[in-house]
């Protein structure tokens, strides 16, 4: 669970239910982090309310500070909780790519066996 999560609102005051939901969703992103990055990760969550004239539209932006990188995801929808869900999905894919790039054994399994199979077909 990510311990350092800073939740702030811009033109929007997040209630207890929203804060608890954000802590739950963003806090579990540490399962996609490499083990060396889990202790030093911090998250900034900015919740905004925009375009009041055109209806209530909410925007969620999450910035993850991890070693040697900063990951950002932003989305706006008609519901704040839905925006948090979409941002979580975007960060999940970014974290998976980060993990593949920074850990040498992830994502490269079976390279030699694929070569053996392709070589056997040529014979």
Image (cartoon, helix red, strand yellow):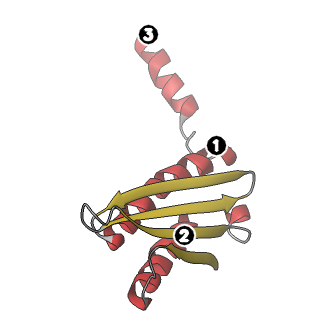
As helix, strand or loop, the secondary structure at mark 1 comes to helix
The residue lying furthest to the front in this view is 53
User: Which residue is more in the foreground, 33 or 47?
Assistant: 47
Q: Are marks 3 and 1 in contact (CB under 8 Å)?
A: no
Q: CA distance from mark 3 to mark 1?
A: 32 Å
Numbered circle sitting on residue 122? 3
**Residue 121 x/y as whole percent:** 41, 15
For the point 61% across and 61% down, the residue is 64
Q: Position of residue 49 (x, y in %)?
A: 40, 69
Res 101 → quadrant: top right
Q: Are marks 1 and 2 in contact (CB under 8 Å)?
A: no
Measured as percent of width and height from the top left, residue 5 is found at 61, 76
Answer with mark 2 or mark 3, whichever residue precedes in sequence: 2
Q: Which residue is mark 1?
A: 101
Q: Mark 3 vs mark 1: give the one in front.
A: 1
The residue positioned 43% from the left and 10% from the top of the image is 122
Q: Is residue 33 visible?
A: no
Q: Earlier in the sequence, mark 3 or mark 1?
A: 1
């Amino acid at each position: 669970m990510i311990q350092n999560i800073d939740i702030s609102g811009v033109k929007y005051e997040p209630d207890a239910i929203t804060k608890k939901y954000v802590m739950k969703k963003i806090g579990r992103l540490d399962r996609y982090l490499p083990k060396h990055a889990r202790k030093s990760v911090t998250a900034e969550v900015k919740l905004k309310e925009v375009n009041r004239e055109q209806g209530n539209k909410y925007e969620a932006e999450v910035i993850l500070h991890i070693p040697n990188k900063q990951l950002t995801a932003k989305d706006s929808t008609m519901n704040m909780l839905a925006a948090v869900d979409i941002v979580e999905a975007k960060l999940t894919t970014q974290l998976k790519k980060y993990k593949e790039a920074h850990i040498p054994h992830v994502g490269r399994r079976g390279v030699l066996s694929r070569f053996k199979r392709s070589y056997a077909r040529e014979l």
